[in-house]
Image (tube, rainbow, N blue to C red):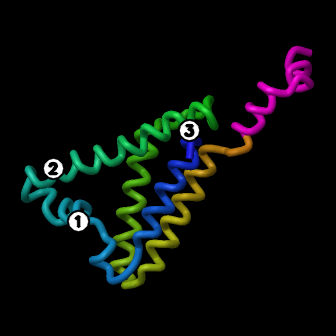
Amino acid sequence: MADPRERVLAYIDFRASLIQGDLPDFTCLLGTMVQETYSTHPDIRDACNRAILFHARTVAADLVEAKRRHAPKAKWDPLDVALFAQAAIQGAFILAKAQHDADAARRAIAHLRQYVASLLPAAAAASASRARTSPSAARRVRA
């Protein structure tokens, strides 16, 4: 899977696919720990933050390349979008717990996927690729 857009979307699909079994089977320990300890145990909060940032940065690396290919003029920051994805996934888990319904998390993550896909239009890369390789497109660009 060479296209970084597809890697980012596959990551979101993977996270959705993990929503199986009982709530504790798929919700995030880091998210739960930081919610419960952020003000009383700063060392735990900071450790959770480091882990969440590490994870977001791996997604951001693909977003950097995906943005370059699919939305080069976009004003959004790849790390901000990666952190938003982490927040949306954590929020999806909170909804699942609140509603005692794993489908609530799946629906929320589906919206995240749609949002990220909208930031990285597939057609933009395809038309850019055609313009680079098509002689008639090259003539239109020069005209």
Q: Nearer the viewer, residue 68 or 36?
A: 68
Give how far apart the Cα atoms at labels 1 and 3 are. Answer: 29 Å
Residues at discs 1 and 2 in contact (Cβ within 8 Å): no
Q: Which residue is mark 3?
A: 66
On whether residue 130 falls in the magenta region, the answer is yes
Image location (x, y in percent) of residue 83: 38, 48
**Residue under the image location 18 percent in, 63 percent down:** 33
**Residue under the image location 42 percent in, 59 percent down:** 88
**Residue under the image location 7 percent in, 59 percent down:** 40
Image location (x, y in percent) of residue 54: 28, 44
Question: Which SS class for mark 3?
Answer: helix
Q: Which residue is mark 1?
A: 29
**Residue under the image location 40 percent in, 70 percent down:** 18
Residue type (three-letter) at the residue carrying disc 2: Ala
Query: Which is more N-terminal, label 2 or label 1?
Result: 1
The residue mark sitting in front, 2 or 3, is 3
- Above or below: residue 136 compared with residue 65: above
Question: Which SS class for mark 2?
Answer: helix
Total of numbered circles in the picture? 3
Give how far apart the Cα atoms at labels 2 and 3 are. Answer: 29 Å
Residue type (three-letter) at the residue carrying disc 1: Leu
Q: Which residues are magenta?
A: 124-143
Q: Is residue 93 left or right of residue 122?
A: left
Q: Is residue 54 left or right of residue 10?
A: left
Residue type (three-letter) at the residue carrying disc 3: Ala
Report crowding for label 3: few under 14, some 14 to 19, many 20 or more residues within 10 A (C-alpha): many
Tell me the quarter of the picture where residue 34 sits.
bottom left
Q: Nearer the viewer, residue 6 or 78?
A: 6
Which mark is drawn over residue 47? 2
